[in-house]
Amino acid sequence: MSAGPELEAVLGWLWAHLGEAAARAEHGFRFPVVAVGGEEVSAATVTLRALWFFADARGGRIALIRRAPRIAWAFYGGALGVQLRASGPSTVHCRDARARALWEQTPLSSRRAYLAPAAPGTPSPGPTSGLPGPVEGRVPSEEEARPGFANFAVVETRVERLDWLALDRAGNRRARFLWTGEGFSGEWLTP
Ligand SMILES: Cc1cc2nc3c(=O)[nH]c(=O)nc-3n(C[C@H](O)[C@H](O)[C@H](O)COP(=O)(O)O)c2cc1C
């Protein structure tokens, strides 16, 4: 870290809060918006799991990330009064050891989301959850959830840029951190 102690404190603060948000559903950074796709940009709210999120491998977003792996995350914790933006190259894990390890840690109630026979965004004649009848409205068994693994993707971002904006009536503050290959180098920016 090539900057003064205050910037170091900001960097410590933001990683601590990202860690906390991955562990605690009520944290203000829990549901960031992720933008993917370069020219075909698409933004969606996802659920934070460290700097990974889970998605259906058949969704258009996964195809966009495979084509353009640099993705951008935006977090806004209203109660914290902080906007945090992070970006970097991302890897899609599907049907590999990484996906398997995280699938096994995912509760059965969440694994159910990957059981829909049709891909996300497929038109439907009426309102639908897309889930097979037997598991609609209840938690599937381990056995029933198993076929969902084929559709389960983990998107993992290697963070290279961080931009922290702290809102304050007396004057906002902003800092940027760039990955140097060995650590993050920080500098203050005019908000
Ligand atoms: C609070 C919240 C959390 C969400 N979490 C996820 C998530 O972790 N993964 C995901 O793929 N979609 C998640 N979604 C749904 C996406 O925002 C999006 O609607 C869906 O993935 C379809 O996107 P697509 O049209 O780009 O395929 C979440 C939505 C909300 C409102």
Image: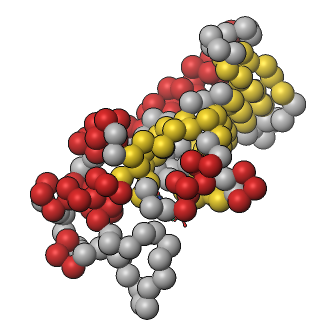
Residue at screen point 65% across, 27% down? 160
Residue nearest the observer in this picture, 54 or 1: 54
75 lies above or below 149? above
Residue at screen point 36% across, 52% down? 152
Residue nearest the observer in this picture, 115 or 28: 115
Q: Position of residue 86 (x, y in %)?
A: 64, 36
Q: Is residue 1 left or right of residue 56?
A: right
Residue nearest the observer in this picture, 182 or 176: 182
Q: Quadrant of the image for the N terminus?
A: top right
Residue nearest the observer in this picture, 159 or 94: 94
Q: Position of residue 33 (x, y in %)?
A: 59, 52
136 lies above or below 100? below
Residue at screen point 23% across, 42% down? 104
Q: Is residue 100 left or right of residue 12?
A: left
Q: Quadrant of residue 101?
A: top left
Q: Quadrant of the image for the C terminus?
A: top right
Q: How many marks?
A: 0
* Residue 143 at least partly seen: yes
Q: Position of residue 153 (x, y in %)?
A: 41, 49
Residue at screen point 55% across, 62% down? 60
* Residue 8 at least partly seen: no
Q: Is residue 64 left or right of residue 47?
A: right
Which coloring applies here? secondary structure
Residue at the far bottom in the pictured view: 125
191 lies above or below 64? above
